[in-house]
Image: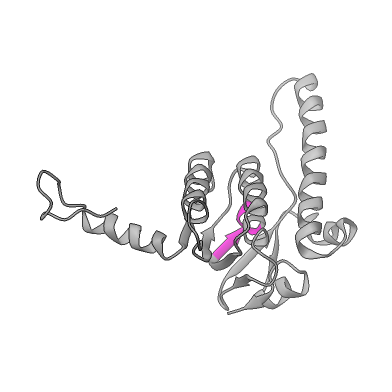
């Protein structure tokens, strides 16, 4: 927690660090920028802090402004969120793309939203295709498995079938308005 200069032998906590602590204490998590393993680890640590060891856990709101990133760490966060007993509000702002859209969807049903001017983009999992034929063949099997997993995840969180969702994720990029995102079950409301 924050320390002040009044405590003997302790350094004062920098103002920005105190501000970040206050945001966290109020249950606000910020997912801004590219999604990687370090970001996901930090978010899981913050969720653990907010939801365990307290008589009354703080309601959690995850604010998302991200162009996406790594898919496997995204699934790790989504799996973790699904095990929590506390409702998780997810709010997209600015831009929510790719893996970030899956995190947005992983919020508690009825508590997933986009700000009115947010851009939302979803697409089918993509990969680079360098290496030997054997390596690419093996990788292609994993890619097909990952695409099925992505569609199953989206189906579970949207209420749409995997077949219905294929229509919008088969393209390189599908941009949806917040209202279209509600129609597709990706979010529940527009703020």
> Foreground: 92 or 143?
92
Quadrant containing the C terminus is bottom right
From what the image shows, is residue 182 above or below residue 33? Answer: below
Which quarter of the picture shows residue 147? top right
Q: Is residue 87 left or right of residue 137?
A: left
- Give the residue at x 80% y 54%: 170
Q: Is residue 103 visible?
A: yes
Q: Residue 176 location in percent, x, y?
A: 69, 69
> Foreground: 29 or 34?
29
- Give the residue at x 75% y 22%: 135
Q: Is residue 97 magenta?
A: yes
> Foreground: 123 or 182?
182
Q: Residue 127 location in percent, x, y?
A: 70, 38
- Give the residue at x 69% y 78%: 179
Q: Is residue 96 left or right of residue 50?
A: right
Q: Is residue 128 magenta?
A: no
**Number of numbered discs overlaid on the protein picture:** 0
Q: Is residue 98 visible?
A: no
Q: How is the image coloured?
A: one colour
> Foreground: 15 or 149?
15
Which residue sits furthest front? 55
Q: Residue 44 location in percent, x, y?
A: 53, 47
Q: Is residue 98 left or right of residue 41?
A: right
Which quarter of the picture shows residue 6? bottom left
- Which segment did they paint magenta? 95-101
Q: Residue 172 location in percent, x, y?
A: 73, 53
């Amino acid at each position: 927690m924050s320390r002040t200069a009044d405590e003997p032998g302790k350094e004062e906590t920098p103002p920005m660090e105190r501000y970040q602590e206050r945001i966290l204490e109020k249950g606000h998590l910020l997912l801004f920028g590219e999604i990687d393993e370090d970001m996901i680890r930090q978010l899981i640590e913050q969720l653990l802090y907010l939801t365990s060891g307290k008589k009354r856990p703080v309601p959690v709101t995850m604010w998302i402004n991200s162009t996406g990133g790594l898919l496997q760490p995204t699934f790790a966060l989504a799996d973790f969120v699904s095990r929590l007993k506390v409702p998780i509000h997810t709010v997209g702002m600015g831009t929510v793309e790719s893996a970030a859209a899956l995190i947005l969807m992983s919020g508690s049903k009825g508590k997933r939203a986009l700000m009115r001017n947010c851009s939302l983009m979803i697409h089918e999992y993509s990969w680079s295709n360098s290496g030997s034929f054997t390596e690419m063949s093996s990788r292609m099997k994993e890619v097909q498995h990952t695409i099925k997993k992505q569609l199953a995840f989206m189906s579970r969180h949207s209420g749409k079938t995997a077949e219905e969702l294929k229509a919008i994720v088969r393209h390189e990029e599908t941009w949806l308005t917040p209202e279209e995102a509600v129609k597709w079950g990706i979010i529940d409301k527009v703020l």
